[in-house]
Amino acid sequence: MHGFTQPTFNIGSVMTTTNKLLLAWVDEVARLTKPDRIHWCDGSDEENAALIEQMLESGDLIKLNKDTHPNCFLHRSDPSDVARTEHLTFVCTENEADAGPNNHWMSPADGHAKVDALFDGAMQGRTMYVIPYCMGPIDSPLARCGVEITDSPYVVVNMRLMTRMGQPALARIEREGHFVKGLHSTGDLSPERRMITHFPEELAIKSIGSGYGGNALLGKKCHALRIASWQAREEGWLAEHMLIVGIENPQGEVHYIAAAFPSACGKTNLAMLIPPESHKGWKVWTVGDDICWMRVGEDGRMWAINPEAGFFGVAPGTGAKTNPNALAMLDHDAIFTNVAVTDDMQPWWEGKDKQVPAFDWQGRPYDSKNGPAAHPNSRFTVSAKQCASASPEMDNPTGVPLSAIVFGGRRKELAPLVMQARDWNHGVLMGASVASETTAAATGAVGVVRRDPMAMKPFCGYNFGDYWAHWLSFADRSDKLPQIFHVNWFRQDDDGKFLWPGFGDNLRVLRWVLDRCAGRGDAVETPVGWLPAKGALDTSGLNIDASVMDELLSIDPAAWRDEVTAVREYLESFGDRLPDDLLDELQRVEKRLQSEAA
Ligand code: SAT
Ligand code: MN
């Protein structure tokens, strides 16, 4: 038998747990993975400093310029491990139909057998870290806890920024007696031996062979979306791929919006938006930039929390014009992954500033022939506390009440700048119909249009048919639900030029959204939803042609008839799990489009 010994190593205060389930699981994992040492993470500053020191020595981290970027570090990942790998991501349920055609499926028995074979001995020579964490404010009834076991110190320091990690989370786990189990090892980083498996019926995750963000920081996509979406259905709430913002008007009133966009479509920029010059007295508060957990409160309104405590944002394109709030929070205490550096070791990426990169994301002397200096999916990790626009409500255990839910995709054509659903069910159809051009956040071709319902295609832990039924069920739970909208910032002209300026000017669209929620804001009815009436969208101070606004705010019924046909085909691929109410809704849109043609 392998000569495994019990924990001997702890950098910070020594933690133990009274939770027998947790102790037994840690023991079972140690027997399988055979680490040299076990370290229980307490989340302390001392622990973090010791881990960083260790990674500087091993070369896992590189120190950045301490004058311009104190406490900032660069991590260069394996070049084959730079994005989520959806084809290696599995949902393992007893019944294949429960995972649905939207997921890659394996039986739990097969999943465990395959992935456990890879975990066998995977931590030999390494330290096994046990990370208790809480997704959401530690005293929030909407929050949920998990424990990640990993052999990656990079994962530990990132989890510390992205979640509420350490002693308080462990205390809550001991109080509640249950937690999501996440097992992770970088393995040998080979894509051939990489698997990200989810066992929603066991509230468990096993991920091996990748050290990249969504594959390795298990609190994020694996727990807070795939497992949580399953839990949410069972418990009557929603776990969504949405940012949350508060919009403060010049009267000082704040209204909250949650918005779903696929990865790398500007959620972080929208969450930290700076109002345009013409919008004196307006302010945007960041509650979250990626994930939203929400439930109907006693007052009938939808209340939302951000389960995360930090931002794992796309670096390229983050600049003084696009996202000054993000740029400002990145000049201290941040971890960068796969960005380039200048010759004086400042982090650099395309769209940052006028500096010149000296070394690219792989550490090679920069040469434009090798492609961009920073990897297109290079990332920053930073605590939300460093964000100037961070909402004081971020830590509120009851969350914030939502006025609107916005769905969006990245589409060159078809979808107008903004439209409002007729009612909740129509809004669910709008969400279910979202399509978007793919981005660098996942491996595979970029720029291909694919259906990405509610921006949850890679993240819904169960059958989309059941998921839409769950969404529809909220109409019976309350008559004070948020209004639903669809936006598209990404329309292009024939030369590939964006029609809408985007960024700070997106506030103009959100203002119309909030006006509509307040029963104001002029709109015209179309077969696919309500669009802003001429002049209803404030374009003052914006240099944009009336003809461009017309193009952005009109629909082409013939193109929409084709779209609706494609949507029907897609929805019907979910067979008998597809809720009738969603098809009825689609039929109503089809009818309206037909009468438009008549
Ligand atoms: O999956 S990640 O969290 O690494 C990034 C994303 O796709 O949003
Ligand atoms: Mn995301």
Image: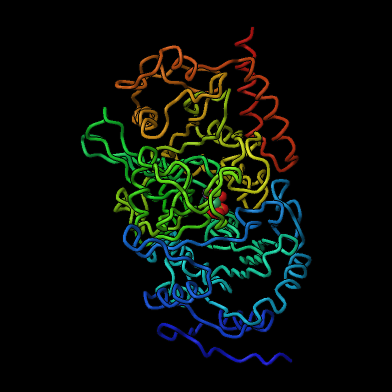
Front in this rendered view, residue 323 or 162 = 323
Q: Quadrant of residue 371?
A: top right
Camera sees residue 47: yes
Q: Quadrant of residue 22?
A: bottom right
Residue placed furthest toward the top: 598
Could you tell me how many numbered marks the image carries? 0
Left or right side of 281 for 360: right
Front in this rendered view, residue 232 or 106 = 106
> Residue 366 at x, y = what percent?
53, 50
Q: Residue at x 47, y 72 (%)?
A: 56
Q: Is residue 172 above or below residue 550?
A: below
Camera sees residue 301: no
Front in this rendered view, residue 59 or 177 = 59
> Residue 147 at x, y = what percent?
53, 71
Front in this rendered view, residue 531 or 333 = 333
Quarter of the picture containing the C terminus is top right
| Rendered image coloring scheme | rainbow
Quarter of the picture containing the N terminus is bottom right
> Residue 246 at x, y = what percent?
34, 43
Q: Residue at x 50, y 87 (%)?
A: 9
> Residue 226 at x, y = what percent?
60, 55
Q: Residue at x 38, y 78 (%)?
A: 46
Left or right side of 572 for 284: left
Q: Residue at x 34, y 22 (%)?
A: 542
